[in-house]
Image (cartoon, coloured by chain):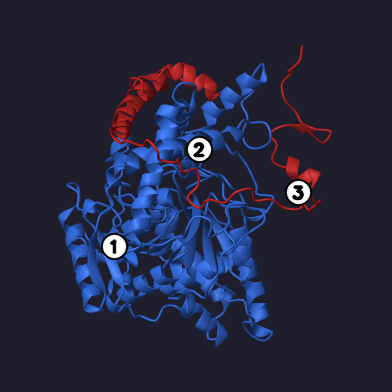
Chain colours: A red, B blue
């Protein structure tokens, strides 16, 4: 594992999370100590061990591809911060 | 006082028409009015809607009794992370704004089908991230046994509301101990079912491979009742498991003769409080007296559980919480382009602990670190799960303290996230292994008088046996009958 130093600004950008400079500073220090603790996993030899993504392994749970009842258009839009003409309103994306 | 009753006591009285559902609901509302100013278990509740549900239950009761609806007229309060149609849902966060759920979670749908009065939004750590309910955007919840102390978390409101008799039972969610730990610290019963036992549809996702819904109750019988109502496969949650749902209540026969209980030697750690250790030792003796056999076992990877958890849980959370972007629901802070809008919305909407975990989770998943952190943690998870499966070849259940100490003071650990994470040391492995666990009251500290919890861990889908073992101990001891003096 790499050194326990996080480039908080870069990771915050990846996470689309605006941080104040105080937040960047305190998060950097706290995450440093948490990562330091997490380093202990390196002690373990896991060669040949399969990863566990889910404790109850179930593969390819499928269902029939049929139309089923779902939220109405109106209900789906009810909680939108901004909407018009039955659509979500977002900032301009394409110039 | 009707609000102090258990589900089984209340439903018996309702069936005999000794009391009405309205009287029971009103008793809970009166208790909320009397004590919730101090405890703050509820973020909000709609008294009019709750009483209307009670009246509907009374009408049905007077039209010929209980039918098969085993929760008819029982007031059950809900953690603010579960969708209840037409009620607010905030996950104790600012980012959801004025969100109103357009549908019921499957667990809620099942409670309603069984006749329960589903009411209230219970306080929690924001997005279920925390162990003290101090990370709520809606203020602290206090421990009913000592209001200078935390109720545990993340389901602190759910535990405090049951302990303070503000409801008959409640629902919470458990990702790393968020049901069992607050249940222990508030002195009630808290059950985390096996992963896949209860559908997660309508539970706002924190860590999808670890989250489970479960009940808080005043005794083990009520936990068995609610588990039976909520369990079962659900086409809307592809991780729910098509295992038959047994009659959990019928399994509670008080008999543990010949059953084997495992004591993991790794759980006798340095930070374990002497009074907690004494209470758990006494509980083990009680089990011996009841005829169970105590076996020392080893869970050799225990020491790696917290580190494993905080990689897997934060990685999953960073992906799950990407949906809170200010576009489709919740609060929005405008920006000149979509990315600025997302960043500003999330920066303003999330609290400090949620930001911490999103950053950590994004980091461990980012290019160059994925194998070293996330994949390594998933492999260690396999080792932890194998420890348990191996132990369960020898024993029927595992006995541990639920928490290393009784409830700590508000503010005591909030400045040190790592210390807060380490307080979950006994509960976290259960979620990683996907097994079931329950916390039951097993005594009190002397001064101040604070509840202590006994944790029992059971095999995957072994809730029948787990609850039977918990119930036998509960019925042989007086702890669950004690009330916080409010």
Subunit ID for the residue under disc 1: B
The answer for how far apart the CA atoms under marks 2 and 3 are is 26 Å
Residue in the picture at 47% in, 66% down: B169
On the rendered image, what quadrant is the N terminus of chain B found in?
bottom left
The answer for how far apart the CA atoms under marks 1 and 3 are is 45 Å
Q: How far across and how far down the image is residue A74, in percent?
A: 79, 44
Q: Read off the residue under disc 1.
A: B399
Task: Determine the secondary structure under disc 1.
Answer: strand
Q: How far across and how far down the image is residue B219, in percent?
A: 39, 71
Subunit ID for the residue under disc 3: A
On the rendered image, what quadrant is the C terminus of chain B found in?
bottom left
Q: Read off the residue under disc 3.
A: A71
Q: In this view, does B26 lie to the left or right of B143?
A: right
Q: Are labels 2 and 1 on one chain?
A: yes
Q: From the viewer's perspective, is residue B177 above or below residue B17?
A: above
Q: How far across and how far down the image is residue B330, in percent?
A: 63, 37
Crowding at mark 3 (Cα within 10 Å: few <14, some 14-19, many 20+):
few
User: As rendered, which of B252 and B166 lies closer to the eye?
Assistant: B252
Q: From the viewer's perspective, is residue B88 above or below residue B95?
A: below
Q: How far across and how far down the image is residue B174, in percent?
A: 45, 52
Q: Is residue B211 left or right of residue B35?
A: right
To which quarter of the image does residue B482 belong?
bottom left
Q: Read off the residue under disc 2.
A: B316
Residue in the picture at 47% in, 58% down: B194
């Amino acid at each position: 594992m790499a050194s326990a130093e996080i480039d908080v600004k870069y990771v915050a950008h990846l996470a689309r999370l605006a941080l104040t400079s105080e937040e960047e500073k305190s998060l950097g220090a706290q995450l440093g100590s948490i990562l330091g603790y997490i380093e202990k996993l390196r002690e373990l030899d896991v060669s040949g061990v399969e990863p566990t993504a889910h404790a109850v392994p179930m593969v390819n749970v499928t269902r029939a591809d049929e139309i089923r009842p779902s939220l109405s258009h109106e209900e789906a839009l009810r909680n939108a911060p901004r909407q018009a003409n039955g659509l979500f309103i977002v900032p301009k994306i394409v110039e | 006082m009707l609000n102090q009753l258990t589900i089984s006591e209340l439903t018996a009285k309702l069936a005999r028409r000794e009391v009405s559902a309205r009287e029971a609901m009103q008793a809970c509302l009166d208790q909320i009015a009397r004590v919730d100013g101090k405890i703050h278990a509820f973020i909000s509740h709609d008294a009019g809607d709750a009483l209307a549900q009670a009246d509907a239950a009374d009408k049905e009761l007077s039209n010929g009794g209980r039918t098969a609806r085993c929760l008819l007229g029982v007031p059950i309060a809900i953690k603010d992370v579960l969708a209840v149609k037409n009620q607010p849902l905030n996950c104790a966060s600012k980012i959801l704004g004025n969100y109103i759920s357009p549908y019921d979670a499957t667990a809620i749908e099942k409670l309603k089908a069984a006749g329960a009065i589903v009411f209230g939004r219970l306080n929690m750590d924001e997005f279920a991230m925390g162990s003290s309910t101090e990370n709520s955007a809606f203020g602290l919840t206090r421990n009913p046994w000592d209001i200078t102390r935390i109720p545990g978390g993340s389901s602190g409101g759910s535990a405090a509301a049951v302990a303070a008799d503000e409801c008959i039972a409640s629902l919470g969610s458990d990702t790393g101990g968020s049901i069992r730990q607050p249940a222990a610290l508030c002195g009630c019963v808290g059950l985390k079912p096996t992963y896949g036992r209860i559908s997660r549809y309508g539970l706002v996702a924190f860590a999808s491979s670890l989250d489970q819904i479960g009940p808080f109750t005043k005794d083990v019988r009520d936990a068995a009742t609610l588990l039976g109502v909520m369990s079962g496969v659900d086409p809307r949650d592809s991780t729910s498991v098509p295992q038959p749902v047994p009659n959990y209540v019928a399994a509670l026969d008080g008999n543990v003769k010949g059953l084997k209980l495992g004591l993991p030697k790794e759980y006798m750690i340095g930070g374990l409080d002497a009074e907690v250790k004494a209470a758990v030792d006494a509980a083990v003796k009680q089990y011996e007296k009841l005829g169970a056999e105590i076996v020392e076992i080893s869970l050799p990877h225990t020491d790696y559980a917290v580190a494993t958890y905080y990689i897997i849980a934060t990685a999953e959370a960073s992906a799950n919480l990407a949906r809170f972007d200010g576009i489709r629901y919740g609060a929005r802070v405008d920006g000149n382009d979509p990315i600025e809008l997302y960043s500003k919305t999330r920066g303003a909407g999330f609290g400090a602990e949620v930001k911490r975990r999103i950053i950590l989770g994004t980091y461990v998943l980012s290019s160059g670190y994925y194998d070293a952190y996330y994949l390594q943690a998933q492999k260690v998870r396999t080792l932890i799960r194998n420890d348990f499966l191996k132990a369960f070849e020898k024993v029927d259940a595992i006995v541990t303290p639920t928490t290393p100490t009784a409830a700590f003071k508000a503010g005591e650990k909030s400045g040190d996230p790592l210390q807060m994470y380490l307080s979950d040391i006994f509960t976290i492995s259960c979620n990683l292994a996907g097994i079931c666990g329950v916390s039951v009251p097993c005594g009190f500290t002397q001064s101040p008088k604070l509840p202590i919890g006994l944790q029992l861990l059971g095999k995957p889908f072994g809730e029948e046996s787990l609850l039977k073992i918990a119930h036998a101990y509960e019925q042989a001891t007086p702890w669950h009958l004690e009330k916080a003096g409010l």
